[in-house]
Image (spheres, rainbow, N blue to C red):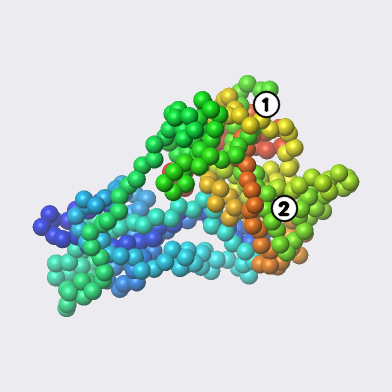
Amino acid sequence: MLPHKAPSSEELIYFPYWRFKGLLFACVPQGIMNKFMDSSHQAVASNFFPASVGLRSQALKLQFVTPETPGRFLEPTLSLKKVLEIFDSRYTVTLDGPVYTHANIGETVSMLYSPFYVNKKMYDAVLNQPISAPLEDESIIDTLKGGAPHWKIQFLPTLCPDCGWDLDGERDSLVLFCKNCNSVWMPLKSKMKKINFAHISSLSDNIIYLPFWRIKANITGFQLDSYADLVKAANLPFAVQPQWHEDIFRFWALAFKVRPRVFVRLANNMTLAQPRDKMVNTIPKGRLHPVTLPLSEAAESLIINLAGFVKPAKAFYPQLDDIKIEPQSFLLVYVPFEVHHHEFIQPDYNLTVNKNMLTLSGNL
């Protein structure tokens, strides 16, 4: 919820807003367009309250709502699915030409409550200023359903479910490590779930391991089962070898957040590289970049990843609406990058990540 400056004698009304933070990608005739969005929209259709909170969600310090928070919290009536459609339309309406496909990636969707009160007029309690003319009937606000908050923050113990050891991880990481029994865990609802992981070894000393999701998916509407299919689809300058028909194709998606303009490039380059290095199923010794992009969001990015490397693009884009990608299995892979002054470099796959392009989850 947003902070307020209302007099203590006033009863606060907290109006709900859906807030979306994330990367929006759209495939149009000109290519793959992207935009970072941090927007809010009413979770209850009402003419009495502002349509959004504007920049307040970014500029003001937010607080968690607890059962002890005084005030009347209005119940949301607009579904998450509907509001995401609204956010999508805000972006796609600005684009030229048809939108062949789009995706929301790295999204953080939350419910934000803004405080108001009624004293002959409707007051914005954040600024303690009126935002309406005198109301003819103040009781109209009472027709909106609401009441005291009935939810609370829940905590999970960061102890390894297998051996009871303390789990390690950065404060913004979505996965935690147990270095005692060599396991990796991801919070899922009310418990920790063990996930499959591996890393690619490196002989260099000054390295950082960046996390990627390697995803095997079922693709309908387009032939992409093997490395040979990838060579043909991406028009790579190689003569297809017989054994490549046996090499299973897998998507590689980022498990960390970067600026929009490099997101697709990195995912494309890793997918085209199809690393075949021997992978070690142990936690690597060295610096690990936190996993800040969940598997669910990585799965959403696969159609944009596909659109980024298939050639020729103009002939392929109109087919995107008929292609379905269903993830079947995944592996969290830590890939070693050499640490240089301004960038991280992976020489085997010709990848470079500028340090300034990396973003912490708190900034997205």
180 vs 99, left or right, is left
User: Which structural element holds mark 1?
Assistant: loop
Residue drawn at the location 67% of the way across and 53% of the way down: 217
How many residues crowd around disc 1 within 10 Å: few (fewer than 14), some, or many (20 or more)? some
Q: Is residue 247 visible?
A: yes
Residue picked out by circle 2: 309
- Badge 2 amino acid: Phe
The image quadrant that residue 206 belongs to is: top right
Residue drawn at the location 39% of the way across and 64% of the way down: 41
Residue drawn at the location 49% of the way across and 33% of the way down: 162
Residue drawn at the location 78% of the way across and 55% of the way down: 233
Residue 353, relative to residue 57: is it above or below? above
- Image x and y of residue 220, in percent: 71, 62
Mark 2 vs mark 1: which is more N-terminal?
Answer: 1
Report the Cα–Cα distance between label 2 and label 1: 28 Å
- Image x and y of residue 78, in percent: 39, 68
21 vs 318, left or right, is left
Determine which of the numbered discs, if any, sits on residue 202 in the image.
1
Q: Is residue 174 visible?
A: no
6 vs 224, left or right, is left
